[in-house]
Amino acid sequence: MILLVFLITVSESFSQQSLEIYGGYSKLLSSKFRLNSFEWNSMNFNRTIDWEFTFSGALFQEPEFVSDIMIASIGKKLGDHYLYARYSPGFRKRFLLNTDTLVTISDTVKVLNSNLNYSEKFGFGYNYQFTSNFSAGFSLRYFEQSYSQDNIYFYFSDSVNTLITITDEWSKEHWRGDVGVSYQPFNNLILSLNSYNLFILGETGGFTDHQNLELNVEKGAVLSIDYEPINNLYLLTNVETSSSFILGSNIKLNLFNTNLALGFLIFHDEYQKPFIAGFQPSLNFSYKSLNFNLAATIYSEPRKGSMPADDLLNNGIHNIINNQYSYNSVSANFNLALNFKPEKNVEFVDVKIINAIFPTFAEEYLTEPIAIGKVVNISDKSISVKPSSFIQAANDEIVYSPTITIPPGDTTDVQFFTIISESKSDYNKREISQVDFYLSTIYEEFDDNLQKPILVNDKNSWDGRVKNLRYFVKHDILESNHYSKNILRENYQALQDTPQPVRDFNRIKILFDNFVSKMQYVSDPRASVEYVQFPTQTMEVKGGDCDDLSVAFSSILESIGIQTAFVDYISEDGISHVNLIINTKLEPEESNLITKNDKKFFLRKNNSEKDEIWIPIETTSLTDFNTAWEIGAEKFHSEAIENYGLAKSKVVIYDIY
Amino acid sequence: MKRLLKYLVLILIIFTFSCDEPAPTEIYIPEVPSNAQVDIEVLSPEPDLYVYQNGYDSIGYVAPTPSNKAIINLSGITNTYKNITVKRTSAFALFVDKSKKVLTPNGRLIGYNSKYIGKVNFNDINALSLPYRVKYRWLGNVVDTTLGWVHYFAQKNGQSLLFPFPYNSSIKFKLDPIIGNDIVFDIPTPYEIIGYVRTRGKPEDDNFEISLHWNSMNERDIAIVVGGMNSTDVSPFPLYKIRVKDTGEISIPKSLLKTFPYGRFNQLVISFVRQKFAVNLSTTDQVVVAQSIHNIKIDVP
Amino acid sequence: MKQVIIIIMFISTLVYSQQFKVDKIRGEVLVQRGTHEEFSPLKKGDLLSDNDLIITESNSFIQLDKDGSKFILDENSALGLSYLKKITINELLLALAMEEIRNVKPSNNNELSKNTAVYGEEANIDKTVEIKINSLGVKKINGAKQLAKNGYKESAIIAAKETYRKYPHVSKIVEDRIYFADLLLSLELNNEALEEFSTISMLELTQKQKNYVDTKVEKIKLSLISE
């Protein structure tokens, strides 16, 4: 059975006065189609829902299309009481009167204009349902108007004569209060009566000399009749005391299991020409708690570009959004009821694991993602997504990656970073672990999650990229420091006797000779590209391949502040080679302190743009320092320099810092 | 609930920032033709330095100081006060050496040295070559100084006309320079301008209005110079120039009339000026212009 | 094992070596082979590889023969024989690019401290260290000029660049710097020449040199604009 409601409303109406931006669909329809406003509120709230929200945006043809927010409103039903508040930023009309006067003041040109602004800022409504078919209510709305006029004045004195332009301004604010009642004698008929401009309250300011430009607030009333003569056909009529009127009808359709209604109305406005000032076709669509309405307002008389001001100057305007200067418009209006359930905003398309985890590279994963997810925003708005992940074998807790914003409907790559926990494991064996990826947006729960296997290597594992050897260098830095200090202490006197500039060079030499004396074997070059020994392990087992030895000796030097870098000799057959270059801190002029052969060193500019002497060392040459240096230099000079290896990226230097 | 509100606020914010404010509706007053552009410019910006007076040219070419190398100016002038009308013809030629500045004792520019470069005549009537005097203010006094030479002829009031100004015709100009051959050319003249001033109200009642009317030719812009004068003064003090399309009518903006220095002047002089530039002879350095000027003096009501 | 590796390395370098033969010789001419420290005198008929550096003293010269083509190195010059080959402009650009590539990249994080342990006492600096200004740099520049004059312009530029970097005091000899900057210009390496002339303009110049360099800089800038 159809609820008989009642309502009231405070209808207000836009004037003509009752023209609505929603296309004026019948109040009898509003149990199926809900839009929240002063004029039509009651029916919306016969449902169980207690909160309602409405947003309206409009597109004006003036003559370029411009969009504006018309209304944002909130309504709340409390028993038989209904409270309503709305913010109406789009209820405004601005005029620019161009006087075609240009003033030239010391070469600057100013145009004299007049600006006239009307706006309805916000409003409040209240409605009480006395019986199931009778309700009454009132509304209060706040208006602001301003007028400014550029005037030119002549300023005359003994010392200076000048023209100045001054903008004279006037403003006016007022509240407007109206009352209304609504009565539904039969299921298919609603009668309502609403005042307009009944009370004008709290007036401040005024336009003084230009009172004719103030918003016209003539009092009046609107009688509305909503009638459903046959099922799904609705007729509506509004008649105003000013003798303006509206005639319209709606047809409800059930298509595709949704509620759809088409509407059409014509209106006559006492203050506009011609007799039928315009018409409004509209479309209403309702699905679950969401209502969508599209309404066009089309004026019979074309209104484009500049219009004559005399009507405004003589009669003013009676309504801000519907007057003799209004443009054609299309409004799109949404109503949302409370039973809206938050849904998933984003979801994974897939996640691709980029790299296995190498626990020793912990630092690497702070800047290099371990995985990249393809994420789609399935909502209709831009969403900020907070990606996070949890590797069971390597994380103590969920690790959050940087937030990214995804436009509606877009698919974006999302990077996942991680922090390898030191306490989680000693990483002695390689294992397949699981990583959980999560996406969260505005809610506490995750919008989506996905699990993927990931290889967590043991701590000696290496991905074969020479740049990553530096993590092995850093691993045992304290032990290396201890080792270096001991050796240098034993050679204290010898070092004291060497001149200062070559002291680093001599330290390198002493440390290398000592290091070599402790090593017993060299394995084949790059015996394994998957396994690298930590410096302490190399010392323990007394040997290793070129990676292991380079890492160990680099660690020994770096631990006492001597800069080193790996040189990666990439060869096409896959067996590449690694050795070290070492910074002696000597300047080019001092090269003859260490060698007479300038092929044995090369220069690198340091961070302060000064050339320093670096020497290549072949760490697998377990003979003595001079031999290791000569072999290293020979190889470096020939491959990196002579054959342009550096420029062709066949030889790559990786600094350790 | 909270989540829903958050959601809605978010939508609102997105909407708010994605929308443009509709532009104001442009409206115009139909009585004013839409191409009636008005351009207003102060003519006497520094009264503490220069002595401004409407000379023969009426629009400030001579006073205070020209910045062109050569100026040839022909004016047909009509002066009206109440029922009295006097007509005059004026012509002058001025040749300026821009490299020679004339400064006040404290270094402000008065003008440039003007030269004698030969004999000048207009329509075969010799122009007088006279010292070019200008006035400026120094320490509160008006000081006379000579900038050089000017060639002109003019009639004093009451004397017979050497020739009546030939409107919508031309005047022959001839320069017989000290060095070189004669330079001769014709300067075209404009239609005569005939103005009419209508006033309503009084300044003391704050409803003073002035509307100006003239014979429109719908050609080039018309300049209207508004000046102040006392009954005892000989020449008006120029205040500002209004440049308008030649539509035949304009009202002086009310705000300008409100701030007219009535305490200082008890008469207003409205000068209607229609100019015709000899386009092919004028450059940025050299101005050759013929003009019709109608000066109408009215008493401030 | 380690001997094996060393031998492999030497072989690999020798395989690519060019062979030069001493064709004529006068006065004192020395050779420094490979990465060895010693200098030894040369005599007619000796064989040289491109890893070797030859040095002529005053009143001496050497003429080399490589597959029938001759090259004379005049007195007071030094030349790495690896430069004695035709290289392409591309290779020259690669070599110039390496100047940048081999610099230490600026680092942001210094978690590995650079001064963990400074051993020894700063007060005991041995002030008797003599930093001998080596005449080798000047000789190398002379050698590079002769390379250029014999048509090995690209090699000459690389040799000069390398020398200027390793022997900074030589880089203050303005006339030579201008010579090599002009050489860059003759190869239409305008940007490189501009950079070089700009650097030269920072040195102490005579008025004549200054005028010359300034004119060049302006000309190159103009030609760069029209490119």
Image (tube, rainbow, N blue to C red):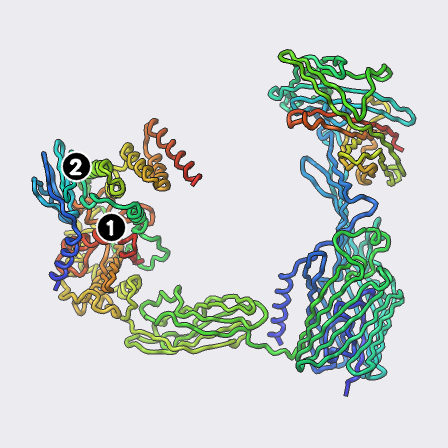
In front here: A222 or A201? A222
Which SS class for mark 1? helix
Looking at the figure, which quarter contains the C terminus of chain B?
top right
Where residue A145 sits, quadrant-wise, is bottom right
- What residue is at 34 percent from the left and 75 percent from the top? A455
The residue singled out by tag 1 in the image is A641
Residue A303 appears left or right of A549: right
Q: Residue at x 78, y 52 (%)?
A: A307
Q: How many numbered badges does the structure rendering display?
A: 2
Q: Residue at x 13, y 58 (%)?
A: C6
- The spot of residue A406 in percent (x, y) is 53, 67
Is disc 2 surrounded by few (<14), some (14 to 19) or many (20+) residues within 10 Å? Answer: many
In the image, residue B182 lies at what x, y percent? Answer: 67, 14
Q: Residue furthest top?
A: B178
User: Quadrant location of residue A462?
Assistant: bottom left
Is residue C1 toward the left or the right of residue A70 in the image? left
Q: Position of residue B102 (x, y in %)?
A: 64, 20
**Quarter of the image containing the N terminus of chain B?**
bottom right
The amino acid marked with disc number 1 is: Ile
Image position of C179 with respect to A179: above or below: above
Asked if one can make out residue A605 in the rendered structure from this viewpoint, the answer is no
Residue most extreme to the right: B83
Numbered disc 1: what chain? A
Chain letter, disc 2 residue: C
Q: Is residue A34 above or below residue C79?
A: below
Mark 2, residue position: C73
Q: Which corner quadrant of the image does residue A272 belong to?
A: bottom right
**Res B58 visible:** yes
Q: Which one is in front in this view, the residue at disc 2 or the one at disc 1? A: 2
Q: Secondary structure at mark 2?
A: strand
